[in-house]
Image: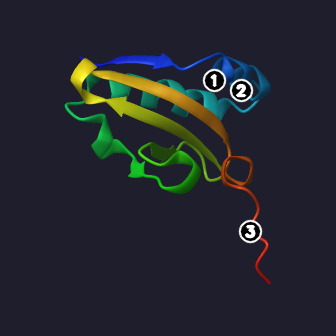
Amino acid sequence: MWSVQPTDDTIDKKLKKFKSNQPLIKNYKLFVEELRTTNDPRLLGELKHGRFQNCFGKHLTKSHSLIYYVHAEEQTVFLIDLDDHKNLYGRDNRS
């Protein structure tokens, strides 16, 4: 079983911010439980690059994602950020 923990209070603040978004909250709770019980949490998300290099991301709703880091040796998953795609990655300024 994996330990799942936030790196700081960012996730708690975001959960309070999104408290009225019940599908997001429900999917977050289900995914955290899935992270705890899976054999390899790296297989549940998509490997990221750039700002979140070496982290994984998982869409919890159409527009919200959870970013996490897996420390395999310690069997710990660190929750990095939870937010709307445009806030996590920036807006696409291409024309």
Could you tell me which secondary element the residue under label 3 belongs to? loop
In the rendered image, the quadrant that contains the N terminus is top left
The relative height of residue 85 versus residue 30 in the rendered view (above or below) is below
Residues under numbered marks 1 and 3 in contact, where contact means CB atoms less than 8 Å apart: no
Q: Which residue is mark 1?
A: 11
Residue furthest bottom in the image = 95
Q: What amino acid does circle 2 point to? A: Lys
Q: Residues within 10 Å of mark 2 (few under 14, many from 20)?
A: few
The relative height of residue 47 versus residue 94 in the rendered view (above or below) is above
In the rendered image, the quadrant that contains the C terminus is bottom right
Q: What amino acid does circle 1 point to? A: Ile
Q: Residue at x 53, y 46 (%)?
A: 52
Q: How many marks?
A: 3
Mark 1 and mark 3 lie on one chain; the one further toward the N terminus is 1
The image quarter containing residue 37 is: top left
Task: Give x and y (percent) for residue 21.
Answer: 72, 33
Task: Give x and y (percent) for residue 83.
Answer: 68, 40
Residues under numbered marks 1 and 2 in contact, where contact means CB atoms less than 8 Å apart: yes
Residues under numbered marks 2 and 3 in contact, where contact means CB atoms less than 8 Å apart: no
